[in-house]
Image (cartoon, grey):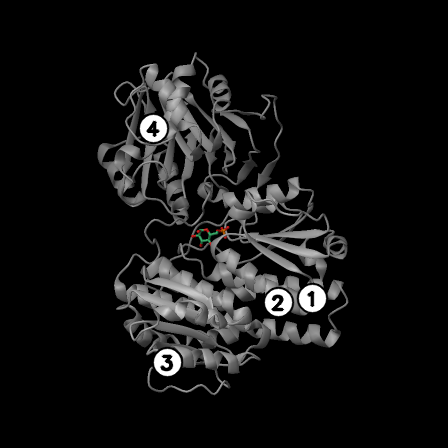
Amino acid sequence: MCGIVGAVAQRNITPILVEGLKRLEYRGYDSCGVALHVNGKLERSRSTSRVADLEKQLAEVGLDGFTGIAHTRWATHGAPASHNAHPHFSPNSDNARIALVHNGIIENHDELRAELTALGYVFQSQTDTEVIAHLVDHMYQGDLFDTVQQAVKRLHGAYAIAVFCREEPHRVVAARQGSPLIVGLGQGENFVASDAMALAGTTDQIIYLEEGDVVDLQLGRTWIVDVNGRPAERAVKTVHAHTGAAELGPYRHYMQKEIFEQPRVIGDTLEGVTGVMPELFGDGAYQVFKQIDKVLILACGTSYYSGLTAKYWIESIAKVPVNVEIASEYRYRDSVPDPKTLVVTISQSGETADTLAALKHARSLGMEHTLTICNVATSAMVRECKLAYITRAGVEVGVASTKAFTTQLAALFLLTLTLAQVNGRLTDEEESNHLKAMRHLPSAITAVLALEPQIIAWADDFARKENALFLGRGMHYPIALEGALKLKEISYIHAEAYPAGELKHGPLALVTEEMPVVTIAPNDTLIEKLKSNMQEVRARGGQLYVFADADSRITSGDGVHVIRMPENYGQLSPILHVVSLQLLAYHSALARGTDVDKPRNLAKSVTVE
Ligand code: G6P
């Protein structure tokens, strides 16, 4: 989702801005743009294509400058069109004084638009962002820093903005409230960006701006004021951000590469886990785990499904009650808080606006024991939570999450064992067996990846369908949900998941010969019940595609297609089963020729509500 980069330097910053945008591409976007201060004028270039095309465009027109801002936009207000792409100018493009980029949503944009229109401003886009550009221009009286501090007081909603002005050529002003923004410090030059990764290779000296901060970036100085306009000291951190995604290597897409990286990254995530130790989740974790008597998991999307899986594990193994809530619902609903709750946020990006807001909401209700399972050590989520477990999936480029999900599951299983241990529900023998199974996960996943040729054969069938059902039971129900999500996200085949026992209460009405029904069939205590559910499908002509454990005695037959999973993996079985569903989604999308890594309308890091 929207990414911001800005710079004030004494060298040409176009390559820095473009490189920054490339590093933010993984978040998802549908247009991009750069604006620079050039010979006393503001110039810009915008594109509804990729950043690489914008780069060519900039080279063609020779757009260079020492001060400027850049942006990748994920459309919220107004279509993904060139005139809606940022940077936005004010008062208008020929005579621009203010250039501005924005991430977030301004809720009172209609009201401000009416006010500014009455003042004579002509809007050239449908965005809420252009409103801020005109507002800043209208309020400008010679000092941009001062103006932005006043202007943001008029904004309701979430924003991270970066602004510069024709009349102050060596200055960029930025502000944040509810959307991420960092400052990068250089030698005689300074930067602003949505995350530290955007500046990797340029500077590793990073300041994380706090809510309400406004920052003045000049060549040799940065100055920050807080939400009340008071000077604010913010710590400078040395951040070794990932230097971006590695090459594709032998893979056709990042998603495929990331699926195949899972054995390694799960190994990395569990590296150093020599035993079940609360301290793995941070200092003071033991005391926190000892005090809590329930768990509340908050997350969105794929991360929500890892939370749902964890509920089965934690309640069964640690015997601690767990509630899993979609962050965007929890943050607005009336709930019954309990200070003895461990609030667990799960997020690959650590910047998801809804999850951050849900966390804040939980804290405002008096729940102070917070833990995050997160893939980005430098993210807002990690900074906001007391305890953290950092998954080590590495940069995930494919918008559809794969390796981030399975590493979350590995971390959540470790959390399960830790809570069980703290509650005296884990014997030494159980601990050692579970750890052995976790250490064996990389090779178990490798064996699942070897099923790819069989899955490709199924994918050819799927590519011709418009609908699919996914069935699972128990802890494999969330895996069915994740399998359906993966398929719809990247192949655009409509897919729904149900707990198999629920089939007869509705979805059975959809089953005909045209309906493929993917069934996750581990050899667990529910297998006989699942087989009955499968009969219900076959009786209506539905085509079953079954991922069965080696020992579950389900065989291929008329309308029943079976792929045998290499082994029955007990409690950790969801981690293996989801890998086969990822491959099914990937190859179905490939067969349909969709843009697998950048599915339409979706973003990797959803930093707006
Ligand atoms: C977006 C991404 C999903 C992700 C969800 C939650 O929708 O496309 O892959 O699961 O956000 O993101 P988070 O970073 O909080 O895990």
- Viewer-proximal residue, 42 or 126? 126
Seen from the viewer's position, the closer of residues 254 and 126 is 126
* Cβ atoms under marks 1 and 2 closer than 8 Å: yes
Disc 2 versus disc 4: distance between alpha carbons?
49 Å
Residue 88, numbered circle = 4
Q: Which residue is mark 2?
A: 313
Query: Which residue lies under the disc numbered 3?
Result: 538
Disc 2 C-beta below 8 A from ligand 1: no
Residue 300: percent from the left, percent from the top? 50, 52
On residue 318, the disc is 1
Q: Is residue 351 visible?
A: no
**Label 3 SS:** helix
Give the structural element (helix, strand or loop) at label 2.
Answer: helix
Kindly indicate the quadrant of the structure image that contains residue 496.
Answer: bottom left
Label 1 SS:
helix
Q: Position of residue 36 (x, y in %)?
A: 34, 28
